[in-house]
């Protein structure tokens, strides 16, 4: 690769972000990684190096970096293998969607596309809505202080279980949460030491999660043995993956199945739970936004229980604006981690083959070049008149390029449905009107586990009646 260097344009080494002796920028990064990257971009430009947790990270950031991920040059220059390989090994699998690129990635993504999309809740829509409401009414008791992130994690596991398998693995929720916490902290984001993976607590939880994966496979096989064919439109991710395994065992070998069955929890648990929790905060913090959302959800539910996902997506503009605005200001994916697949130039700097790179795609979320009064929580930015997020490279809550979130359309529906149910049903209160959200960065950025809201009361007695025919 070095032989290519003479043909490269002139370049300078990327600037190193000034930090504390020894600690470098660890503290600032740990406190608020999204705004830290935004500050570095402002002061140092598109490419910079950061010293954190004893390592020197290369960051390429901003709208240019977000756009680069989707270009041919970006696809050839970036690979995902190293970032996710420890997780593949931990599961004893041969590969996973996030860890492969190119043709193989396309093939795997095609197998899983439908199961991860909102198509997967077609026909199961009312059940997911019922699960959501039942879990909320059970866990958000009037008078209680609800630990929001934890309550949302329980809810998401039940929702994803219903979407994926038609049932909710409630007795495994704790094990799924523990396994994912350790995996993300140690293997993916590498914020915690490796010896933690030897802790009995983790090993027990992982064994249970594997048990769940094997059960899912067994249930599928039992159903097929009974001749229980499923109509095409009711097939889940499990059906699609198992059928692809039978069709092409080289693409999906038996040893990968447990990872594939439980993978959606890894992808969906923290992302959705952190995001919904942040929305609870942002909306309660802005009473004028809450009032608009109340008016909207009340009007929708006054017609009877919503009957399809379009109603949540199209008839609740204030709620959806609040969701998008929260994802701008509290992005769960501050950066995507890749390895340089070859030497390449970016922003006048040479990035070397093999270098680990953080792509700071959320940096534009905080730039006034894209968002008027960027620090302000303003849910009207996204309407047709302003559409600030539509500017090239400006908005990337679901990532960029070939690995852009495969669960995006499903996540959008789950977010809107969950938040509509929360705000329709409950009168909630922050710990105090001047309360400022405490956040965490491990395993992923989001509200701290200590964030609680008080349920002052139910806004509506009972549940909305079924829609009149
Ligand atoms: C608020 C909710 C969510 C957010 C913000 C989110 C964000 C992301 C981001 C940023 C990526 C790209 C990671 C990378 O490039 O390294 C990603 C990938 C992915 N997400 Fe999501 N996600 C969410 C919910 C979900 C859900 C509910 C599922 C499915 C159950 C899901 C499934 C996936 C999958 C399978 C990938 C890997 C795609 C690939 O590698 O080709 N996500 N997500």
Image (spheres, helix red, strand yellow):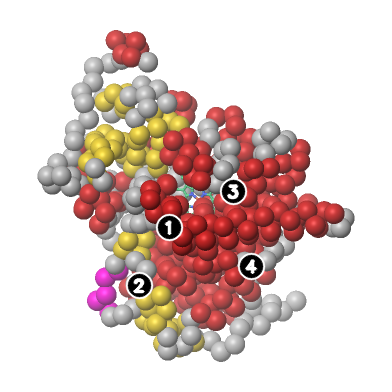
Labels 1 and 4: the sequence-earlier one: 4
Residue at mark 4: 168
Query: The magenta stretch spans which residues?
Result: 433-437
Q: Label 3, label 2: how many angstroms apart (C-alpha)? A: 31 Å
- Foreground residue among 179 and 428: 179
Task: For marks 3 and 2, give the one nearer the viewer.
Answer: 3
Question: For residue 181, what is the image quadrant?
Answer: bottom left
Q: Label 1, label 2: how many angstroms apart (C-alpha)? A: 27 Å
Q: Is residue 398 visible?
A: yes
Q: Secondary structure at mark 2?
A: loop
Labels 1 and 2: the sequence-earlier one: 1
Other-residue count near label 3 (Cα within 10 Å), few / some / many at <14 / 14–19 / ≥20: many
223 left or right, relative to 325: right
Q: Residue at x 63, y 50 (%)?
A: 258
Q: Label 3, label 4: how many angstroms apart (C-alpha)? A: 18 Å
Q: Is residue 434 magenta?
A: yes
Residue at mark 2: 451
**Count of marks, rendered view:** 4
Quadrant that contains the N terminus: top left
Q: Residue at x 43, y 39 (%)?
A: 83
Q: Which mark is residue 295?
A: none
Task: For marks 3 and 4, give the one nearer the viewer.
Answer: 3
431 left or right, relative to 51: right
Most extreme residue toward the right is 227
Q: Which mark is residue 199?
A: 1
Labels 3 and 2: the sequence-earlier one: 3
């Amino acid at each position: 690769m070095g032989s290519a260097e003479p043909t490269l344009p002139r370049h300078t080494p990327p600037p190193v972000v000034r930090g504390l002796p020894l600690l470098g920028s660890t503290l600032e990064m740990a406190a608020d990684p999204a705004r830290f990257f935004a500050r570095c971009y402002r002061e140092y430009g598109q490419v910079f190096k950061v010293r954190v947790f004893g390592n020197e990270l290369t960051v390429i950031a901003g709208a240019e970096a977000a756009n680069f991920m989707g270009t041919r040059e970006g696809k050839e220059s970036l690979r995902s293998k190293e970032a996710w390989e420890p997780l593949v090994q931990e599961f004893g699998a041969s590969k996973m969607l996030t860890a492969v690129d190119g043709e193989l990635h396309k093939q795997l993504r095609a197998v899983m596309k439908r199961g991860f999309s909102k198509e997967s809740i077609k026909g199961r829509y009312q059940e997911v809505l019922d699960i959501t409401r039942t879990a909320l009414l059970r866990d958000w008791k009037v008078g209680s202080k609800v630990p929001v992130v934890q309550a949302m994690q329980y809810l998401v596991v039940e929702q994803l279980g219903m979407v994926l398998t038609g049932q909710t693995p409630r007795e495994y929720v704790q094990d799924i949460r523990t396994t994912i916490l350790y995996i993300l902290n140690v293997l993916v984001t590498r914020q915690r030491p490796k010896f933690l993976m030897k802790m009995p607590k983790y090993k027990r939880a992982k064994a249970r999660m594997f048990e769940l994966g094997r059960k899912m496979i067994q249930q599928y096989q039992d159903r097929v043995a009974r001749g229980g064919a499923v109509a095409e439109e009711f097939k889940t991710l499990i059906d699609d993956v198992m059928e692809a395994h039978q069709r092409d065992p080289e693409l999906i070998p038996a040893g990968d199945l447990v990872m594939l069955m439980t993978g959606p929890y890894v992808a969906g648990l923290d992302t959705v739970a952190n995001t919904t929790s942040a929305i609870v905060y942002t909306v309660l913090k802005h009473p004028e936004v809450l009032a608009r959302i109340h008016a909207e959800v009340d009007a929708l539910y006054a017609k009877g229980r919503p009957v399809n996902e379009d109603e949540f997506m199209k008839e609740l503009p204030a709620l959806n604006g609040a969701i998008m605005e929260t994802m701008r200001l509290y992005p769960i994916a501050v950066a995507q981690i890749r390895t340089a697949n070859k030497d390449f130039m970016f922003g006048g700097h040479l990035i070397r083959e093999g270098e680990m790179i953080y792509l700071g795609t959320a940096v534009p979320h905080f730039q006034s070049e894209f968002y008027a009064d960027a620090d302000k929580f303003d849910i009207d930015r996204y309407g047709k008149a302003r559409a600030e997020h539509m500017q090239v490279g400006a908005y990337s809550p679901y990532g960029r390029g070939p690995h852009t979130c495969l669960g995006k359309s499903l996540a959008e529906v789950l977010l809107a449905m969950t938040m509509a149910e929360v705000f329709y049903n409950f009168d909630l209160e922050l710990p105090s009107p001047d309360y400022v959200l405490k956040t965490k960065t491990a395993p992923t950025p989001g509200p701290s586990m200590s964030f609680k809201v008080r349920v002052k009361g139910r806004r509506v007695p009972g549940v909305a009646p079924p829609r009149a025919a």
